[in-house]
Every structure is written in structure tokens, then in C-alpha cells.
Image (tube, helix red, strand yellow):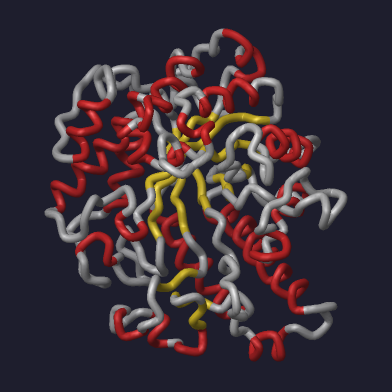
Amino acid sequence: MGRLSRRTFTVAAAGAAASAALSGSAAADALPADVPAEPVPGPRSGPHRRELRGMWIATVANTDWPPAPGLPPDEQRQHLLGLLDAAVDRRLNAVMFQVRPTADAFWPSPHEPWSQYLTGTQGQDPGWDPLGTAVHEAHRRGLELHAWFNPYRVSLTTDVTRLAPTHPARSHPEWIVPYGGRLYYNPGLPEVRRFVQDAMLDAVRRYPVDAVHWDDYFYPYPVLGQAFPDDDAYARYGAGFPDRAAWRRANTDLLVSETAARIKEIRPNTRFGISPFGVWRNAATDPLGSATQAGVQTYDDLYADTRTWVKEEWIDYIVPQVYWNIGFPAADYAALVPWWSEVVSGTDVHLYIGEALYKAGVPGQPAAWQDPAELSRHLTFDRDHPQVRGNVYFSSRHVVSDPLGAMSRVVADHYPARVRTP
């Protein structure tokens, strides 16, 4: 790839809003993949001259993009380019683009229907290839493109008739379970585990994505008064496990380890990263846990043994969602970052910290989130923990809108120039 020329992209609607909200040419300081990074001045120079600076682009329920279903293809494309340009303006170097939010696809998948969030109708061809475009345009701007998938979520309702007629969940009703007002593929079925891998990895075969990225949804978050209905699967496959929880964790472990191996077979340079809920276990539950009192623990409630995935090096990076402020009693940012730093120590797994930019300035959040310097303090704190190799911000629309000027403060304090990823 040659050096990018200095250029300005004309974008519409959200793209124009991004240009108005941010200073500088959208791609003026783009960093092509073959141009060495300059060291970051100050404490992060030397071993930390490279760091990941990312943002999530959420598509489920049109959270970040596209801003509404059914927009003309050119308008959707310009909105997407506007978000990529915003990442460049903020001196970021990676985007986590959600391309399979609800057992659907943002590319022409042979396994699952086109996403309803593109056209308003699941299965309807949008007339262009969003993932292919995103990969190409991100790389033109010197951005990594991490394809973000949700393995098991099928629908935000339990009404199967709202799925496309050709949807695999309608062809295989035995694969799905209703829970908490939503539909999920059953993680306890080996055929489901294989299918969801096939569906996700089709994108890896088709496109030079820099990483496969998952968020915090494995078994769903617990719903008060409801039990996840997997009795039949447990009766068929749970023999040999001490209890159902151990069996469920083993199912998730298999999903992670098998996917990791298959990614390396298909595209060896593509990485595999996961962004779990920030608390593995509380120390009161397990002496290996963190000094937290969180109401949710991924090991116990989502059946996701995130610590083991790091220790076994099944994944290349982990982005715990440390979505709390410094000093928050139940889950202190200043307690969790050192804990995660210790977890990755001695492994080849990179640690990036997920940041709750979306909380800045929100009424009802703790007072710290009313201070535009809170996020900048997080990065200052991270400097004392060399295992932290970067930060990722939720989400892209907040990177653009910049509530309280919190993102501008991060850039001014910590991102004097664009850099390469680790």
C-alpha cells in the first residue's frame, strides 16, 4: 500500500456532523500500514511507542450505524465513511465494526440473511457490501478493521415469524431457545457451535479483516426469575461434568478454542480478540478474583471463563469492559486495571481497556462522569501498568458527539500523533 495523499472526504448527514464536530482534515494525517509510527512523547515512548486506540461501531438496533434502516446505499456508505474519518481525526487506529449483531450479516453471507438494520427487512439485499467497503476504506485510512460478531443472539424478540423465511433458526427450530424476551441459539448443541463458527468465519475467508472480535455476550446475562431453558441439551451432553455450570463453561471454552484454531487455519495473520464484562470473579467468590463486589461475574453468570482464555492463550487480545470510574466502590477502575494486568502477565495476550465514553455527562451517573477529565485520568493511570497496550471507546457516535469534551481531552492529553497498533 502506498502513502496516502492528503485529502478531504465529503460526507453527508452523520459524516458531515463528524466533520463539523472534529478539527482537521478527515484523513490528513492518515497512517498507511507501511509507514513506521513515530514514538509517542512522554511516559508511553519506548516499549509503548505502539498502542491500540479503538472505537466500537455498533449496528444492533442501529445504535451507531446506519443511523436508520432503509437509507439509500450511497447515504449509508457516506455515513460509514464519516465514522472512519472521525476515527482518523481522533488519532485512533482501529475500529471494531459489528457485522453480525443478531444471527444476520453485513456482507453477502451464504449462511445467514442480510441484516434488517440495513434495509428494514431481514434478508433484503442492501445493494452494496458494507463489510467489504469497511475493510477497504479502513485500510486506506491506516485503520485496522476488527470484524465484530455476536455468536448466539438470534433476535431481540421471541417472535420467530419476524425472522426471514430462509433464516436458519426457522429451518432448525430445535437450535433456538427463548429467554428474557429474546431468541438465542443454544450454546449446548455441538451442531449450533459448528454452525455459528461457519457463519462468522465466512467473513474471514472473504475479507482481509485484521481481527475477529467478540463482545461480552455468551450465555445471556441472567434475567431475574427465569432459568435458561437448556434442560434437553444438558441431559444429552452434560454427562461427566460436576454440574450444569461447569458444562456451560466447557461449551463456551470450546467455542473460543475451536474458533481460535480455525481462524489461524483460514487466515493466519488475523487476530482473535474478546471484550468481556470487566469482572471475571469477585475476590469474595474466588481468591483469584478482583477486589470488586460486582453483581455479575462472567465465570458464574455468563459461563465465560475469561481468565482461562488468557492463560491458555486461545485469544490474541482481551478488552475487558472496565466501564466504571476511578473510585467506584463496587468495581473500581483502579482495582480492575491492575488485576487484568496481572492476568495477562507472562502471556502473549495483549491487554486493551474498554472505556465507557458513553457515560460522560449522563445524568444519574456518578459525579466522576460529569467531569470531562475522568477518561483522561484513566489513560494516565494506565501508564503505570505496562501490560496495558491501548484503549477502546464505546461507542463511535460518542467519539463523534464528544460529550463534555471528554474525548477531545483524551486526544489532547494522550494522542499527540497517530501511531501504529502493537
Q: Quadrant of residue 343?
A: top right
Q: Quadrant of residue 285?
A: bottom right
Residue at x 35% of width, y 36% of height: 138
Q: Nearer the viewer, residue 157 or 109?
A: 157
Instruction: Evaluate whether residue 145 shows in this view.
Output: no
Q: Is residue 301 above or below residue 416?
A: below
Pinpoint residue 375: horizontal percent, then vertical percent.
51, 28
Quarter occupied by the N terminus: top left
Tally the numbered discs: 0
Outermost residue, right direction? 287
Q: Is residue 380 left or right of residue 313?
A: left
Q: Nearer the viewer, residue 283 or 302?
A: 283
Outermost residue, top direction? 41
Q: Is residue 73 above or below residue 55?
A: below
Quarter occupied by the C terminus: top right
Instruction: Evaluate whether residue 276 shows in this view.
Output: yes
Pinpoint residue 82: horizontal percent, then vertical percent.
25, 36
Q: Nearer the viewer, residue 296 or 114?
A: 296
Pinpoint residue 300: horizontal percent, then vertical percent.
72, 64
Q: Nearer the viewer, residue 413 or 153?
A: 413
Residue at x 36% of width, y 32% of height: 403
Pinpoint residue 160: horizontal percent, then vertical percent.
36, 84
Residue at x 83% of width, y 82% of height: 240
Residue at x 40% of width, y 61% of height: 100
Q: Is residue 296 above or below residue 237?
A: above
Q: Is residue 242 left or right of residue 97?
A: right
